[in-house]
Image (cartoon, grey):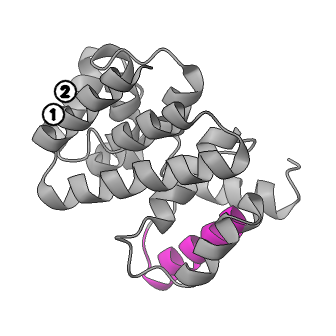
Amino acid sequence: MKQSDITKIRRSMEKKLDAKRYEHTLGVAYTAAALAMRYGQDMNSALVAGLLHDCAKCMTNEKRLSICAKHNIAVTKAEEQNPFLLHAKVGSFLAMKKYGVTDKDVINAILNHTTGRPGMSLLEKIIWIADYIEPGRRQAPNLEKIRKLAFVDLDQALLTALEDTLQYLNRCKMEIDSMTQKTYDFYKNGGQE
């Protein structure tokens, strides 16, 4: 995408998202761009994915469910009970249909930014990590360690952040998406199924 397209997306996000979510979005986009520079990934792709990763986050649950029903987007039982979980699926759909994103890697980075998936591309890892370490984040355990590690060993940063996420969800007795567990297991086993 051209710089003018990225500017349009940024302006649209400023209007669509609440102030706190917009600040987070900018943090993710700029962190993703920095990681892209570090690891030789296309910077514009990282910016676009970062700007759009939460584009469906401020929608109502009803709106997310309605978009899924209207466009035949599969909804799991867990997502039906907790429609806020659909923001990644709906966001990847909006990236294509509303914002004209055609790059499958960018779409997958948006789609998988919450749970991850086994065998993620470099861009998917960058967006997942950028979402975790952006400057506005304050509460994740080992955050400073993971921030430093992200610029040294992206896979190790990903594994550490996934482990911390699973421990947090277990401690808080929150439901764990099976894909998050599968992603952790995949990277814990050195990228083997």
Q: Is residue 172 magenta?
A: yes
The secondary structure making up most of the magenta span is: helix
Q: Is residue 66 visible in this depiction of the protein?
A: yes
Q: Is residue 2 above or below residue 134?
A: above
Taking depth in this image into account, of 51 and 115 the one nearest to the observer is: 51
Q: Quadrant of residue 67?
A: top left
In the rendered structure, the answer to whether residue 171 lies left or right of residue 92 reads: right
SS at mark 2 in the image: helix
Residue type at the position of mark 2: Ser
Stretch of the chain drawn in magenta: 157-174
In the rendered structure, the answer to whether residue 185 lies left or right of residue 44 reads: right
Query: Residue under circle 2?
Result: 66
Q: Is residue 37 above or below residue 102?
A: below
Q: Residue at x 36, y 14 (%)?
A: 100
Q: Is residue 178 visible in this depiction of the protein?
A: no
In the rendered structure, the answer to whether residue 119 lies left or right of residue 46 reads: right
Q: Residue at x 14, y 39 (%)?
A: 16
* Mark seen at residue 63: 1
Residue 175, percent from left and from top: 45, 65
SS at mark 1 in the image: helix
